[in-house]
Image (cartoon, rainbow, N blue to C red):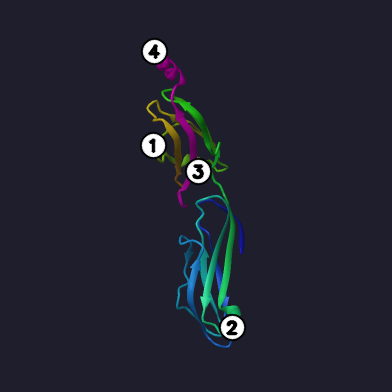
Amino acid sequence: MDVGKVPQGDSLSHEFAIYNSTSRPITVTAIQRSCGCEALDLVVGTVIPTGEPVKFRYGMPTRQHGHRAAVLRVFTDSLDESFREIRIVLRAEIIALVEASPCLVQCGNVVQGQQRSWQVTLTSADPQILAGFRSATPVHGIVECTVKDRSPGKLVVSVEIPLSAPLGRIRDSILLGFDRQLNLPVRLTIPVDGEIIADPKLDIQYLQTP
């Protein structure tokens, strides 16, 4: 079942039915979901009478945008081999409510002690979503971030490398949160990658010192 395009953060579930066309009742003996976070109101032990359907809802989270698929496998005690395993697939394209440019902050090599900054511009077709901006938080605390511009339809966040950042690889992310009145909040993660290196001028001076 392909439900098409669904906004990120919205609830996504669909009603399915298993119709028992065999000559005896069948019982659901096991259920396997492709992810434990998927919603399902069908349980093991459900009996499906002969000639009748059992209806249930199956859903998947929409936290991350892109093409997504959820696979449900229902096992029964049917004598008919075609009813032993019933496979249901739920597909959707999750549409991002907030777009980030760039979607990845590539810092490259940053000399220790020299403060650098990069800007990330956030846009949305729905101005109300950006109006619900709540927070921009570094996940690992290596980088810092501040809001530089907050106007209708656009939000600019500055990502900075502090002067005290230690030598080594920069592996951090910025977690952005947006509240929505009647829907699930929107979360957006922007990875930050690079490396803090020693100042080569300091190395040369150290070698030349008598």
User: Which circle, 1 or 4, is nearer the viewer?
Assistant: 4
Query: Which numbered disc flags the more N-terminal residue, 4 or 3?
Result: 3
Q: How far apart are marks 3 and 1 (CA)?
A: 26 Å
Q: Nearer the viewer, residue 4 or 161?
A: 161
Residue 199 is tagged as none
Most extreme residue toward the bottom is 23
On the image, the x and y values in percent for residue 117 come to: 48, 27
Residue, disc 3: 129
Query: Which numbered disc flags the more N-terminal residue, 3 or 1?
Result: 3
On the image, the x and y values in percent for residue 189 come to: 48, 43
In magenta stretch: residue 114: no
Residue, disc 1: 141
Q: Distance between the residues labelled 4 and 2?
A: 87 Å
Query: Which numbered disc flags the more N-terminal residue, 1 or 2?
Result: 2
Marks 4,3: beta carbons within 8 A: no
Q: Tell me where the magenta segment starts and ends, as one range.
A: 181-210
Query: Which numbered disc flags the more N-terminal residue, 1 or 4?
Result: 1
Residue, disc 2: 80
Q: How far apart are marks 1 and 4 (CA)?
A: 36 Å
The reply to whether residue 113 is in sight is: yes
Residue visible at 47% across and 27% down?
Answer: 110
Give the SS element for disc 1: loop
Query: Which numbered disc flags the more N-terminal residue, 3 or 2?
Result: 2
Query: What type is the residue that disc 3 sits on?
Result: Ile
Query: What type is the residue that disc 2 sits on?
Result: Asp
